[in-house]
Amino acid sequence: MDNKYQALTQLAIDLTVSVSSQDRFDRLLSVIRKLFNCNASALLAFQHQQFSPLAINGLYDEVLGRRFNIQEHPRLEAIARAGDVVRFPADSTLPDPYDGLIPNHHGELNVHSCIGLPLLANDRLIGALTIDAFDPHQFDQFSNDDLRIISALAAASLHTSLLMEKLENQAGVFSNNDPLDAFTQQTSGMIGQSQGILDLKSQIKAVADTELSVLITGETGVGKELVASSIHQQSTRCDNNLIYLNCAALPESVAESELFGHVKGAFTGAISDRKGKFELANNSTLFLDEVGELPLSLQAKLLRALQYGDIQRVGDEKSLKVNTRIVAATNRTLHEEVKAGRFRADLYHRLNVFPVHVPPLRERDNDVVLLSGFFAERCRAKLGFKRLSIDPAAINILQQYSWPGNVRELEHAINRAAVIAKSQAADSYLQLKASHFQLNAEHLITQDQALTNATPAENSKLFSTEHGQGLREATNDFQATIIKQAYQENANNWVSTAKQLKLDTGNLHRLAKRLNLK
């Protein structure tokens, strides 16, 4: 019993240490694992009838990308509705959301010990803590009062983090006084923990509540529309709808009408007055997707609207004043288009007031794993499976692919693999294997690419075939060698090691644990 309360005391101390929210969450689960000797645990935030993992312990990394709708997960729904400790019977027939997602355990978690702790703040559900063990009697020694103490400490930690998020955004971006909304608006839409995506979120946060025009650049499929939506949702204009216009799909004959509207009789077929996108976006945000495709003839009229806030409907002599913010996106290199005479320089500078670049997926480190989990969970719901997991060997293949189509290509690859797996499955519990993915071999990262920065000794280690070592084992050995070397070079400092390896510190900690380096 003394050990139990020592652990609780340590937990309370850890949660008061001035560290980042993610470190606080990771410490929480580390103490949980030590206290309960459990096989898996997760801290989840709750909003809009779904749980989003904030930290995990003993689960595959892909879980961090999943979003669990409680209507599709009866155990999580029971936790959300309970308001108190939930102990599921060891032989409960309710499917477990972590089926197939715990390393070294394949298939259903038929008989095991499972506890759910709802996390409350001001009598409102803000999250949950789930604790699982393979031994059905693992948690028998803990009373409900013990568990309520854990729940209260975890809820305090989460609520503190939410309040800190709100304070950081106190300039007025979030006006509803709900700290959970402030937290989830920044984290729910954009999946990833790489430095590139963290820098992107920081840029979005900086520009969102200004009135500056934003130009979003990036390759096809990186998620530019999601960035535009995030900018709008974090702005003071978020109460109004984001207005979208795909400039690439505009026939030149109707482009001016689409942007500025028209009056009845302006041209054949104009049977009534019609508002254009600029007018519809008055006091809101207009997202001009593929703006580089606009014809030169229309660029001059767009420039005037940006300069003066004046628009004129086609066929109308009167001008209208609008207060419209512009967020534009393109996969073209616009300054090169300017040099080539295909894009007006003055319009380019009007749009490029605050440039935001979205990194390609191949530069986002471990984000491909989280995104795979996100798309797998969404695909599972669409196809009606009880479980859809991804085999670790398949995850390795996904990490080795360069993704020329970026996030959109990854989503399609997951969906195709699921359909193929479904056609071969005998039940509703699916696991996507490497053989289910149909990826273009020329875009797999080659050995030469992997060896670019490796020493001869490391190369030999990576591709050693002694003792029957396979690709996964060789890759793990290679990663372990690189991390240990960097760790020693940085005086055993994990933060400095992460910077040298260009990894998120939390991702490095999880990778080191998986490779048994911690």
Image: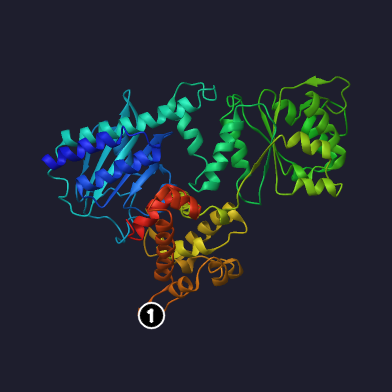
- Residue 413, by quadrant, is bottom right
Above or below residue 238? Residue 415 is below
Q: Position of residue 20 (x, y in %)?
A: 40, 37
x 71%, y 26%: residue: 324
Which quadrant: the C terminus?
bottom left
Instruction: Give the structural element (helix, strand or loop) at label 1.
Output: helix
Apparent side of residue 26 relative to residue 151 in the rendered image (left or right)? right
Specify the amino acid type for callout 1.
Answer: Glu
- Reading the image, the residue beneath label 1 is 466
Apparent side of residue 26 relative to residue 498 in the rendered image (left or right)? left
Above or below residue 272? Residue 351 is below
Q: Is residue 131 visible?
A: yes
x 62%, y 29%: residue: 241
Q: Residues within 10 Å of mark 1 (few under 14, many from 20)?
A: few
x 23%, y 36%: residue: 150
What sort of colour scheme is used for the picture? Answer: rainbow
Q: Position of residue 80 (x, y in %)?
A: 32, 35
x 66%, y 51%: residue: 219
Q: Position of residue 70 (x, y in %)?
A: 37, 40
Above or below residue 459? Residue 322 is above
